[in-house]
Image (tube, rainbow, N blue to C red):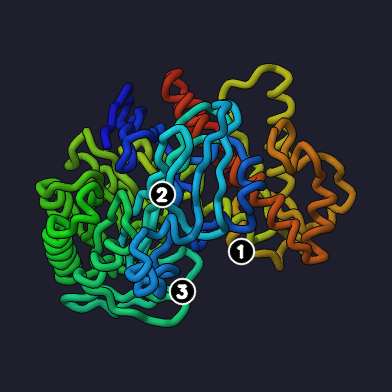
Amino acid sequence: MKLSLSRVVSGCRLGTLTNLGKNGVQTMELPGCLLYTKTGSPPHLTHDTLQAVEGVPAVVQLTLSTLVELHEVLEEYKEGIGKFIGLRLFMSPSLDDVKCQMSPEHSFSGQVCQSQCCTALSMILVPPAHLATTTTRGRLGTGLNPTLLISHRLQCCQMATTFGRYSLKTVSIWGYGGRMEMTASKFMSMQRALQPDWLQCLSDGDTISGETSRKRAKKSVDRSLSFLDECLQLQEKSPELQGSVMVGVIEGGDVLEERLRSARETAKRPVGAFLLDGFQGQAMAKETKLKLIASVTAELPEDKPRLIHGIGKPDEVLECIERGVDVFESFFPYQVTERGCALSFSYNYNPDPEAAVLEQNGIQDAGKNGAEKDINETSKADPEITSFEIFLKEKRYRDDFGPLVHGCTCYCCQNHSRAYVHHLLVTNELLAGVLLMMHNFQHYFSFFHSIRDALRDDRLDQLKELIFRQAL
């Protein structure tokens, strides 16, 4: 894996990750995001519906908590998680007609025609009970060699996490079967069965539930470094993992000195990337969070990517990018979908006159949504609803026959109306989740594309102003 930076502007890094996967045939543009999945399947979507989404990221994220029960099965199977779940990418004779045979599960390798290999990328991160898997896939219909990478997260963002269950030698993971204690040895044994390309190392991330004492922050760093050293030693002895890249995790709670120590010590180890952990949720003050992120990234080498988990809102993403973060999750579109909402924020920082009118309509719609919060119906909605989305269960959308977002090219906006999606939501039809997920994913992925364009055009300030104007 190689990171090539083409521009660095006020801390924002524009570049490309190349040589991804054990076969080195995939690339990923930065800043970017991972494709969020549940047990390897994008929520609500099948392979066919995912193909209709434009700009799908090259890297797919899986959660280890959903895979841990398969450990013994995969050890006996011996051919890795990708082949086990049947996730393959096949290239047709025409490079303009790339087809991805993806099961509704995890991800990984398998032979691709024309002598290309589909590889699995596995990353492991350890917030309290988090272990994620990342998968890389070729962009459909672009002529790229299809590649699949898997990355691991200890626990799905939708699963409840219990704190205070870490010990000196173990990390607790909450799966569907309850709590499981994970040692470094057991963890690496699972990785040998999964056969990933990236390993996001085990770490002590139990430092995000409120204020963390200096003593507890120091312990989290010490334990995380100990886990990293042990995992690196075990990796050297594992033939199945010789081509895998270890991702080091930066811990330390909200204590600056420990965060910096974690960054410096982790950077001394042979890791291929860094994960900034412990910034998810609202336990840490925003000013503290941003200061810590900026301080940590300043200590990390420039030639390795920086990932962060738990950051998804557009305004927060831009703030982190300004502080040197490269890769994000895409759980935010899923959360929006689960609320019965559609992303409606504008990210067009330089529209043509006609598009400007359409975009302004979208912003006004978002404003109306905020102005009507006092309506009884809306007040009963999810309190987590943000100003970047519209709540389509509201009665005012019952006879709104326009698209979810004017000018949007997603399948839902091109073929259906707000009124139709409103109907699906109030009647609890499963198709509502499918259409909303397709729209929200494409809207979110296009937002990252706009970020990269803005960096190339020296227009990030305009994009940031546009996004923050919509962040009520």
Asked if residue 298 can be seen in this view, the reply is yes
First in sequence: mark 1 vs mark 2 = 2
Which disc is residue 132 wearing? Answer: none
Q: Give x and y (percent) for residue 288.
A: 31, 53
Q: Is residue 73 above or below residue 432?
A: below
Which disc is residue 383 wearing? Answer: 1
Disc 2 marks which amino acid?
A: Ser
Q: Is residue 389 above or below residue 41?
A: above
Closest to the camera, between mark 2 and mark 3, is: 2
Closest to the camera, between mark 1 and mark 2, is: 2
Question: Which residue appears at 30% of the width and 42% of the height?
Answer: 22
Q: Secondary structure at mark 1?
A: loop
Viewer-side residue, 18 vs 257: 18
Q: CA distance from mark 1 to mark 3?
A: 18 Å
Q: Is residue 84 left or right of residue 269?
A: right
Which disc is residue 109 wearing? Answer: 2
Q: Secondary structure at mark 3?
A: loop
Q: Dot 3: few (<14), some (14–19), or many (≥20) neighbours within 10 Å?
A: few
Disc 1 marks which amino acid?
A: Pro
The part of the image, by quadrant, that contains residue 406 is: top right
Q: Secondary structure at mark 2?
A: loop
First in sequence: mark 1 vs mark 3 = 3
Q: Dot 2: few (<14), some (14–19), or many (≥20) neighbours within 10 Å?
A: many
Instruction: Determine which residue is flagged by label 3.
Output: 160
Q: Is residue 285 left or right of residue 431?
A: left
Image quadrant occupied by the N terminus: top left
Q: Give x and y (percent) for residue 334.
A: 57, 55
Viewer-side residue, 440 vs 122: 122
- Number of numbered discs overlaid on the protein picture: 3
Q: CA distance from mark 2 to mark 3?
A: 31 Å
First in sequence: mark 2 vs mark 3 = 2
